[in-house]
Image (cartoon, coloured by chain):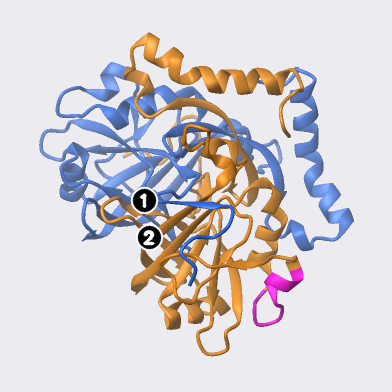
Chain colours: A blue, B orange
Amino acid sequence: MKQTTEGYRRIEPTTLMAPLPVVMVSCRDPESGRANIVTAAWSGIVNTHPPMLSLSLKPERYSYGIIRASGEMVVNLVDRRHARACDFCGVRSGRDVDKFQTLGLETVDVEGCSVAPGIAGMPVHLGCSVEEIRPLGSHDLILAQIRSVSVREDLFDGDGSMHLERAGLICYSHGLYQQVGDVLGFFGYSVARPEVYRERMQPFQGERDRKASGRGRK
Amino acid sequence: MKQTTEGYRRIEPTTLMAPLPVVMVSCRDPESGRANIVTAAWSGIVNTHPPMLSLSLKPERYSYGIIRASGEMVVNLVDRRHARACDFCGVRSGRDVDKFQTLGLETVDVEGCSVAPGIAGMPVHLGCSVEEIRPLGSHDLILAQIRSVSVREDLFDGDGSMHLERAGLICYSHGLYQQVGDVLGFFGYSVARPEVYRERMQPFQGERDRKASGRGRK
């Protein structure tokens, strides 16, 4: 095996997967009744049936104990409008500050959770129940089942189709928050018939044209 | 608990986390010597020390058996140029087609892996060893340690700083491949001093201006 590969530079083994989802996880201490939010990029989908996600947290995080004790959490997808709040919830501790109050955020009830609230105004709420917690080293891996999904009304078309691409979601990539941008294709587009490709890509082409002409939403 | 929350529509519980990383995972059958690529969006970082990632695959996927038998895989981050190849590797099986050959892709050696190859030209190779496999239902959760990280040379500045935001990475969001776009902030920007914020955001502001004036790379 070669020690180096031409055109590549080796760096120390590190968590350089990107982009990653960045989510705001809301929870509530069942004893004190206090709600908190923690931001996490070490998260993802781990199973389709039943729908499950993973969230890795350092055990010393304030929310870790709450999620562990309550067995519940709400994963809130994050749009551009909440990027600053998202960052804030990643760098400040709920031990020191009431994040809902400080950020002017409100809680909402989320189906499938009896104590954990969602954050009002976020594009999507995933109501989750904790199934298992596994220590891995610096972080504990929380495996959770998605018990409910609520989507903001404005992300549906008149015909009931959901358009998550209009939410302006953000992601996390090597220390940066970045906007999720242009649609490049749909699942299966590489093998789709040309007429299917044209039809399914047409709405996104329009979106790009609007942006290019400066008439798009920011 | 209310059954519905104003402004939200409930849908069936499903894997609606977004955006997600979409990676091309390369592997090699230790017996036949045959290399394959599988695309996965059910993946993410699960631990910092040691660096670990997760990858969930259906056990019936051709690559699943190879990764299980070899105990190795290379996670390749995906840029816009490889979006079609990425989709193709998600909808076709290595049982039916030699994906490297069909897509005109080449293998490269990756440090820390004795059999699994990387895909030449991808922005980042993460050489991984499988630590544990847990069945969750439809998918098996593969927990792997990141043993090596190789980054394409052109993503480094003259001073050795890495600029992953120049790679043009893509993500996966509710059935769509989307470009990772504008930089909105850096980790900690919500509490940064104004002068720190200006200095650290300045390079990305320039990038946006170049794009807006049509002089940027596509």
Q: Main secondary structure of the magenta part?
A: loop
User: What range of the chain is rendered magenta?
Assistant: B93-102
Query: Which residue is denoted by mark 1 in the rendering?
Result: A14
Amino acid at dot 1: Thr
Chain containing the residue with disc 1: A
In the drawing, what numbered circle is on residue B146? 2
Q: Is residue B101 magenta?
A: yes
Q: Residue A170, percent across and down?
A: 51, 34
Could you tell me which residue is drawn at 17 percent across and 37 percent down?
A62
Amino acid at dot 2: Ile
> Distance of mark 2 from mark 1, alpha carbons?
7 Å
Q: Residue A133, percent across and down?
A: 23, 59
Could you tell me which residue is drawn at 57 percent across and 33 percent down?
A167
Q: Residue A176, percent across and down?
A: 45, 32
| Front one among B143 and B104 | B104
Is residue A67 visible in the rendered structure shown here? yes
Q: Residue B137, percent across and down?
A: 41, 72
| Front one among A92 and B217 | B217
Evaluate if marks 2 and 1 touch, with contact meaning CB atoms under 8 Å apart. yes
A45 left or right, relative to B19: left
